[in-house]
Amino acid sequence: MIKNIRYKTKIAVIGAGQAGLSAAYHLKKLGLQIGQDFMILDKASAPGGAWQFRWDSLTLSTVNKIHDLPGMSFEETLATQETEVQANIAVPHYFDLYEKKFGLQVYRPTVVDNVYEYQNRFHIDTSETLFSTLGIINATGTWESPYIPPYPGAELFQGEQLHTKDFKTADYFRGKHVVIVGGGISAIQLLDQISAVTTTTWVTRRPPLFREGPFDDMAGHNAVAMVEERVRQGLPPLSVVSVTGLPYSNEVQAMERRGVLKRFPMFSEITAQGIKWNDGKEERADVILWNTGFKSSLSHLDSVLPKEENGGILMAGRLATMVAKEHRIHLVGYGPSASTIGANRAGAAAARELLKTITTEN
């Protein structure tokens, strides 16, 4: 079906999570009018970005940190100071209030199927509507692209293979032996909960690195800088969390005392009944839970996004949000801005640099 252009604008922000709302806020601060000069498109039917889909047991006391969006404190939106409030309720509520306070109208649910270039403009094709824009700030994050690495024998496994994204409650696993794969924060949190109700085996590619002391602003800055260095070379990004280490928290120490932090190296293959290591040792499993992260959700940009031979994207700009070979596209929530540590500053940089580009070129 050929669609007529229904909306024409200067800048389209795709995604209304932390990075997208930050970019939209700064576009408005630069004098652009929402709806006329820029638009925000979001796949979800309600405010909250990926936070609205997180598991119920993830509370404000167990998340790393909720970083404020520019111009409005998260704390001031909380009806209570209790730390056991569900993150999937508190953060979407914050985003909802934020959109209303700054008049950031979001077109939702709007699923972007494809972006292509025509007559020096980007055409954004959705299921019902065609948008046309001079520039794009892409803020689609990673939640829609869970990553499970290929392993020999995976198709033979007679149990369940799930990803972090599929987790709802630990009770689901009661009475099953669960192999938990991954050395990140999510893996540790789910290992803690699931091991309380059933037996578990924890495997990681590398020995986990625990850090003591608070994760302060300097540590966050250093972590972001390491990821930024990679994308400025056109290399696929590492996650920010992968270079921060794991907090040696009270919860982790309690897990140690319970004996559930016994880590095994990565298995070499999957069998019909479980997993197997190179030395021939096998472990039965009912569930393999992959806490192996996410990839950037960028497939809708395939026809307009220049990629390097290694699959990475060469990034430029003050905070590495600008695609070096296509200055009219900025990626926030990619590489160094893939966590809330860097999303706010990236949104500001992308807004300023993209506005300058489209003003100069048109």
Image (cartoon, grey):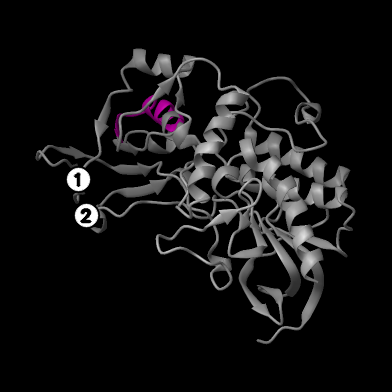
Q: In which quadrant of the rendered view does residue 297 lie?
A: bottom right
Q: Secondary structure at mark 2?
A: loop
Q: Nearer the viewer, residue 268 or 45?
A: 268
Q: Earlier in the sequence, mark 1 or mark 2?
A: 2
Q: Secondary structure at mark 1?
A: loop
Report the residue at 89% width, 58% height from top: 33
Q: Amino acid at mark 2?
A: Pro
Q: Position of residue 123 (x, y in %)?
A: 69, 75
The 10 Å Cα crowd at callout 1, few under 14, some 14 to 19, many 20 or more, is: some
Q: Is residue 127 left or right of residue 192?
A: right
Q: Which residue is mark 1?
A: 268
The answer to whether one can see residue 63 in this image is no
Q: Quadrant of the N terminus?
A: bottom right
User: Compared to 254, does 167 lie above or below?
Assistant: below
The 10 Å Cα crowd at callout 2, few under 14, some 14 to 19, many 20 or more, is: few
Q: Position of residue 154 (x, y in %)?
A: 26, 54
Q: Amino acid at mark 1?
A: Ser
Q: Which residue is mark 2?
A: 152
